[in-house]
Image (cartoon, rainbow, N blue to C red):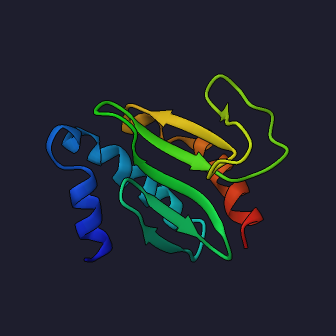
Amino acid sequence: MSNEDVVDELYSGPKADLRPIHDRVMEMVEVLGEFEIAPKKTYLSLRRKRQFAMVGPATKTRVEVGLNMKGIEPTERLILLPPGGMCNYKVNLTDPEQVDAELIAWMRTAYDSAG
């Protein structure tokens, strides 16, 4: 199954309206440089030497971007996750407009620390 097939499956049915958010995130992450996409059952893992981010539908109304980075002060938007999980932080997105310079800066930090 191709990455595109996986994405089509992730954003099918009631989650179809979230696809533009996912596409915008992926468009922005492409500018960071080379990385590999490891499709999982419920999300895409974005990897360099190790995972720096994950993107996937969390609910019918929200895409979740998980980020692996250290030393960043959490904010209302950048949610610190409990230790031991797949990612250190997450950002919830409900609109493509939320894929902005702030999110891209966090993704750049995670990207740079993974490679």
| Residue at the top extreme, as displayed | 76
Tell me if residue 20 comes above or below residue 28 in the rendering.
above
- Total of numbered circles in the picture? 0
The residue positioned 70% from the left and 45% from the top of the image is: 88
State the image coordinates of residue 52 (x, y, percent, origin top left). Answer: 64, 61
State the image coordinates of residue 97 (x, y, percent, origin top left). Answer: 42, 35
Looking at the image, which is closer to me, 22 or 33?
A: 22
| Residue at the front extreme, as displayed | 84
Q: Is residue 30 left or right of residue 79?
A: left
The residue positioned 18% from the left and 49% from the top of the image is: 12
| Residue at the left extreme, as displayed | 13
Quadrant where the C terminus sits is bottom right
Tell me if residue 11 comes above or below residue 8 in the rendering.
above
State the image coordinates of residue 100 (x, y, percent, origin top left). Answer: 53, 41
State the image coordinates of residue 94 (x, y, percent, origin top left). Answer: 39, 31
Looking at the image, which is closer to me, 87 or 32?
A: 87
Quadrant where the N terminus sits is bottom left
Q: Is residue 109 left or right of residue 96?
A: right
Tell me if residue 104 comes above or below residue 115 in the rendering.
above
The residue positioned 28% from the left and 65% from the top of the image is: 6
